[in-house]
Amino acid sequence: MSKKKELIRKIEAFERISVEEALFIYNTFNISELIYLANKIREKFHKKNVYFIENIHIEPTNICVNNCRFCAFRAKNEEEAWNFSLDEIITFLSSIPETIEEVHITGGMHPSKNLKWYLTLFKNIKDKFPHAQIKALTAIEINYLSEIEQKPVEYILELLLEAGVTTIAGGGAEILDDEIRNILCPEKGSKYIWINTHKAAHKIGLKSNATMLYGHIENYYHRIKHLETIRNIQDETHGFLCFIPLKYRNKNNCLQDKKEVNLIEDVKLFAISRIFLDNVEHIKAYWPMFGLERAILCLHSGADDIDGTIYNTTKIFSKAGSEVLKPCIYLSELIELLRNEGFVPVKRNSLFNIIN
Ligand code: V47
């Protein structure tokens, strides 16, 4: 049997593929072959289901002590900066539908926003939306809090859990390779900061997501090694809910000379991720990053989740050049869109439990 035929057999039999095999597949299979195989796996996990959520983001500040080269979100001057007080956020929450299932909180690392500030924010959210779940802070923000509080990461995680956080957001992973991180986001430090924080979160029962920022200075090898790191952690802890490929958008940042990858590369990346990550149930096509049309295409190429309504509450991707300037979609529109594509829309909460 040829190497290619043997790999197709393996994938169709849902056998695990190695890093070397994944690289061979990524480099030599054409896009239709990748889509076909990724869909086989997607359908084994989820049939025609596509999961979605009614959610909002809170981005408390864009003032950040770090200066990641790809970031367009961080304030470059005083005019661009915001740093919301608790009262301002509470006022903003009164405009949000009571029915939301998830509040996603992430932002810049600002020295005045300490652990007590976030815990008070979480309490206010729980008071206002008792049944909503909180997905809060990336591993990098948690490590920053650990630094300013001079307490171990485990201590911060325990308090987040006690305050009602169910999930740690997936950001800050970028590419889990220290040479790439040194160029891309040197202040974020070694990949082990992200890895160890997620492992520690899983150990105490917090769930988390894993992201990968692709399409900048990394290559296929870095991407597959990144996926291998996620797969290894998942074998050990089973704590990841979903994997989220994030396409690098090149506006308003220090890397803006770098051309963005094309649609074919987006689709190939989603497909190879589905083929490789045999132990992560969900793959999210995060639509504010590259629009609903591309997200739908990725749902036909291995992804099974489209995130949610957002209600125009995130600026990370619009600032970086996404075609979606004000990400907002209503539940009825989202459901109709998914049905028209032949999918079965399934409403979920932040922990991916299904809601009738
Ligand atoms: O870590 C920043 C990415 C992430 C750019 O957990 C950029 O469900 C592309 O992690 N081009 C933060 N990407 C957002 C994030 C996230 C988003 C949606 C859902 C979840 C989840 C997590 O945004 C950063 C970085 O990887 N990012 N700038 C940019 N120019």
Image (tube, rainbow, N blue to C red):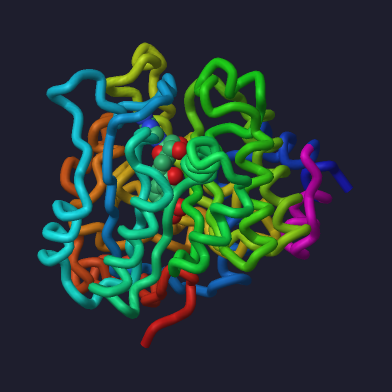
Locate residue 229 relative to residue 270 in the image: left or right: right
Front-lying residue, 315 or 271:
315
What's the residue at 48%, 46% (across, down)?
138
The span picked out in magenta is 6-19
Instruction: Specify the farthest residue to the top.
Output: 257
Front-lying residue, 173 or 284:
173
What's the residue at 70%, 40% (across, down)?
25
- Judge whether residue 39 can be spotted in this image: no
Locate residue 235 relative to residue 208 in the image: left or right: right
What's the residue at 71%, 36% (across, down)?
225
Residue 246: horizontal and vertical position, in percent? Answer: 45, 41
Is 69 above or below relative to 264? Answer: above
The image quadrant where one finds the C terminus is bottom left
Residue 45: horizontal and vertical position, in percent? Answer: 60, 71
Residue 211: horizontal and vertical position, in percent? Answer: 52, 45
Is 164 above or below relative to 144? Answer: below
Front-lying residue, 28 or 183:
183
What's the residue at 17%, 41% (across, down)?
325
Locate residue 43 relative to residue 258 in the image: left or right: right
- Judge whether residue 22 can be spotted in this image: yes
Q: How many marks?
A: 0
Task: State which image quarter holds ligand 1.
Answer: top left
Front-lying residue, 237 or 269:
237
Q: Is residue 171 magenta?
A: no
Residue 72: horizontal and vertical position, in percent? Answer: 31, 27
